Structure formats: C-alpha cells, structure tokens
Amino acid sequence: MKRDRPALSLAFWVFSSLITLFPIYWMFVVSAKSRVELFGAPSFIIKSFFAENYWATITNTTYQGFMFNSIVIATSNALLVTTLALFATYALSRYPLVGKENVFFWTITNRMAPPAAFLLPLFLLYTQVFVVGDWKMFDTRIGLILLYCVFNLPFAIWTMRGVIDAIPHELDEAAYVDGAKTWQVLFHVITPLARPGLAVTAILTWVFAWNEYLFAATLTSVHARTITTGLAEFVTVTGTNWGQMAATAMLTLIPAVLFLALVQKHIVAGLTFGAVKG
Amino acid sequence: MRPQSVGWLFLAPTLFILFVFGVLPFIYVLVVGFFDWNSFAADPTPRFSGVNNYRELVFDSGYLMSLWNTLRFGVFAVVSEIILGYALAQLFMRNFPLKGFFRTIHTLPLMIAPVAVGATWRLMTVPGLGPIPYYLDKWFGIDFLISRYPQQAFFTTVVMDVWHWTPLVTLTLLAALSSMPKEPFEQAQIDGANRFQTFWYVTLPMLKPAILSAVFIRLMDAMRTVDEVWMLTGGGPGAATRYVGLYIWRVVFPKTDYGYGSAMSLITLYLTIVLCWLLYAGLVARRDLRRTE
C-alpha cells in the first residue's frame, strides 16, 4: 500500500492519541496529587508524586482481597467461556442442527436484557434457591463466574462463529477420512487454526468480567467482592476523596492495559464478530 | 452417535448455563410482572394484578421519558461511533510509522471498566477540579455545569460513550476491511470509479455485515448502560440522563417496586429485541433483494 505524506499522518495520529489519552492522563494527574494540590486552576504537570493515594489502596487488605477476587473470577470465566464457546460454535458451524440459526440468535438475546431487572431474581435465586445445606451461591466467586457467562458466552459465540466458519470444511473431512475422532478434529485441526480468534475471545471476555460492576455489587457482600465495587464505593461512601479514587481506578486499568499490549496484534484478526456470514 | 446428537452435546453446556442464569431469572421476571409486589408497601406480599403493571407503564411519563432519552442517547452515540470508527479503521488500513503503537493507544479506552470510565469523566467535569468546566469558562465564557444543565449532561454522556466505545467499532471494521479481497477494488479502479463510487458500490456493500454487527452490539449495550452514567451524573440533573437501565434500577432497588420493575424490564427487553430484529431483517432482506435483481 502507498505511504502518503508521513509527517501529516504522524501529526494526525499524535493529535488523535492525545485526545484518546487525555482523560486517562488527567486521572493519573489527579491520582498523583494530594487533596490540597487539586484545588484552584487545573494543572497538568505533576510536581511531586503523591504516592499516598496508591499506598492507601494497595496496603489496604480489603482492597487486596478485591483484587484477588477479580483476578480469580475474570480468569476462570474467560477460560470457561472460551472453551464452551469453542464447542458451541463448532456445533453451530459443522452440524446440521434443526433450528440452529434460531439458537444462534437466541444466545445474543441474553445480552440484551437490562441487567438491573435481573438483579432481583438473581439475588433471590442466589440466596434462596441455589443453596446446599449451609452453602449459598450468594457472595461466592463461582456464582459470579457462572453468571458472567450469560453476557460473555453470547459475545464469544458471536465472535467465534466467523472464525470457525472461515476454517474450510475440507480440513475436518480430510481428518475424518483419516480416521480421526470428533475430539481429535476439534483439538488438533480446529483449535490450532482458530488460535488467534480464541486468544482474542479469551482476553476480551476476561476484560469484560474484570470490568463488570452491577452484578458484583448486588450478588456479593464480603467474600467475593471485586475491585470495581471497591472503586464505586469512593463515590457513594467517601464522596470527595478524588485522589484515592483516581489511584484505585488507575490500578484497575493496569491488567487490562498489559493484556492489550500482549494481544494487540491479533485483536483485529479475531474481532470479526459474526460478520463473515453475510 | 448420530451427528445431530453430537452437535447438541457440544451445545449442551452453553444452553444449560444460559438457561439457569439467563432464562430462569427471565421466567421469574415474567411471572413477577403480573404481580403487585412492593416490599415497602403496607401489604408487602405479592398480589396477582393481571396486566395492571403494563397498563400503568403506558401512562408512566417518567418511564417513557427515560426510554426516549435512552433512544436519543443510543442514536447519537452509535451514529458518531460508526462514522468515527469507520474513518479511523480506514486510516489504519494505510501504512505509517508506529502503527501498532497508535493502534494500541486507540484501543485503550475499550479495556477500561465502565465504572472507571465514569470516574474519569467525573474527574474531568466536576466543577472546581476538572479541566473541562475550567477552560470552557476561561476561553469561551461557557457556564459548564453538568449537575445543573440537562443538555450538557446529556451530551457529556454521549461524548463519554463515544470515547469509550469507538475503539470497538474501529476494531470490528478494521477486521472486516483487512479480510476483504483486493480484486473488486482493482476492478473498480480499472472501470474508472471515483473514490465515492468505490466507497458506495464496493466498500459499503462488502462492509455491511460488519457495520451491522457493530451497530447491533453497540445499540444493545447503549440501551442497557448503567455503570458509567451512574458514576458520571447519577442520572441527573433531574431525570435528564436517567436512562432506562438506571430508571429500572431505581424502581427495583431503592423503591423495591418489584412487580412494576419487572414489567418495565420486560417491555424494555422486548423493545430492544424488536429494534435489533428490524435492523437485522431490514438490512439483510434489502441486501438479498439487491442480489436477486
């Protein structure tokens, strides 16, 4: 492809990046200042890094617990969702199932529901119905891991559908002719070819699970609370501790940013989101 | 085993989880929607009330207003995101230095938790702290106060949504653009098509499925936005940014009006599905029609 006016395009991308980064930079500025420094005219320069905002969150054992829960929940959810979505899309793509297009569309309707409405039934299910002896699903990590499947599975299926559909059927058929079993075809033919798509799906579902707030806030109380609920508490409880709120928000973006740096090359190839069919 | 059964076996865990955590609560909402049930009322036990909740809903100006605002919010945000996202995707198709680096930066907002996005924009707009009100006042003399002016609050939520979600559209369209075959473009060039004609007759039809799915997922998510707007404006001023998700949340939680909240969510869900289905059917059908011509 032609390379036109590199200086101009560089200028554009720098400008556009500044706009994109500005809100995050501002949050960083606020997180690095003490309460007193924040008053008056906004200043974009950090004269001395006020680390107390960060230490207050990092050394707080409650917030350490929130972080740990978020990591466990997001990772388990991403692995579970990616595996199940691989199975589901393989079935939808390769088997002559009756009404499979309706099933495909139905999965996405699970993502459309206004979450606020489902908080109450889920709350009641988690506290009254999903109970075994002394154990309740309320305030457990597994409760959130399974629940997050409701919005992550449809996303994963719709993303993976295009990826799996694009793998030529001849490859499976050749493997079957050679006497391969179904699981062998799935793991040795499909999975290696779908790897970029699988990676992107896993990462994005991880990020969605990490970022979720409303369900986590309602369906947990002490043991399974996540970092986003901790962040929201700054607005509802302490109100004006902007510095520590910004610091905590900065902490919640670190893993997401690291992941992004890792997969940014594959992210485009993976994100066809069901668009191959048309 | 018959291929049919193997296929369903692969789908079974997905369907099971979606059933238990998606359909069961849905059925519950469906049933509760027919009851009069408010745990703060004089009589906190659920009483069957038929379609009474739905009848009330039609005349509930607060709900209709929030639905209208949500739709307005969705349309403004999604249209801006598609235009901006398409422009950025097209620019990313070119070669320029540090491409990967810039692409990472332009993907960044997507990865941030909605709660954190709301927090960020609150820090940007809070009076006495944020740079936006400060410089708008200093340079243009604009009194920017989203806790007072409904229009400003509305457009701030739109801008926040565009900032947060344009990357998703960019990536989706970029994926589609990079997987497009080269031949139609070469053919168009040979046939002497100008830039606009190439865009209208070659790029757009091939890009339509990708645009459609981007509109789809964004519209759906815009219709159910809660966290970001809650952190930014809390739904105010007044009810200006109390989008339908927030409105339902208020009815179900602080007001504990479970029956009415359930009916409301069902109608909202139904409207979202109808909207998406119309888009889907309309655009897909039109395309098939053109193909047969």
Image: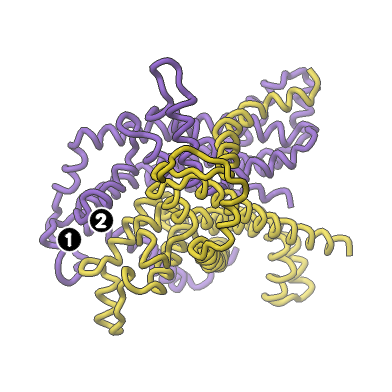
Classify B12 as above or below B107. Answer: above
The chain in purple: A
A104 sits to left or right of A149: right
Residue B166 x %, y %: 50, 60
Residue A232 x %, y %: 31, 48
Residue nearest the viewer, comparing B161 with B269: B269
Check the residue under mark 1 and report the chain it is in. A
Residue at left offset 12%, top offset 57%: A48
Q: Are marks 2 and 1 in contact (CB under 8 Å)?
A: yes
A60 sits to left or right of A95: left
The chain in yellow: B
Residue nearest the viewer, comparing A257 with B6: B6
B54 sits to left or right of B238: right
The amino acid type, in three-letter code, at marker 1 is Ile
Check the residue under mark 2 and report the chain it is in. A
Residue nearest the viewer, comparing A24 with A237: A237
User: Looking at the image, can residue B204 be seen?
Assistant: yes
Residue at left offset 51%, top offset 60%: B63
The amino acid type, in three-letter code, at marker 2 is Phe
Residue farthest along the right direction in this orientation: B293
Crowd band around label 2 with a 10 angstrom C-alpha radius: few (<14), some (14–19), many (20+)? some
The CA span between labels 2 and 1 is: 9 Å
Residue A56 x %, y %: 16, 43
B194 sits to left or right of B20: right
Q: Which residue is mark 2?
A: A28
Classify A88 as above or below B188. Answer: above
Residue at left offset 69%, top offset 24%: B9
Q: Earlier in the sequence, mark 2 or mark 1?
A: 2
Q: Secondary structure at mark 1?
A: loop
Q: Which residue is mark 1?
A: A46
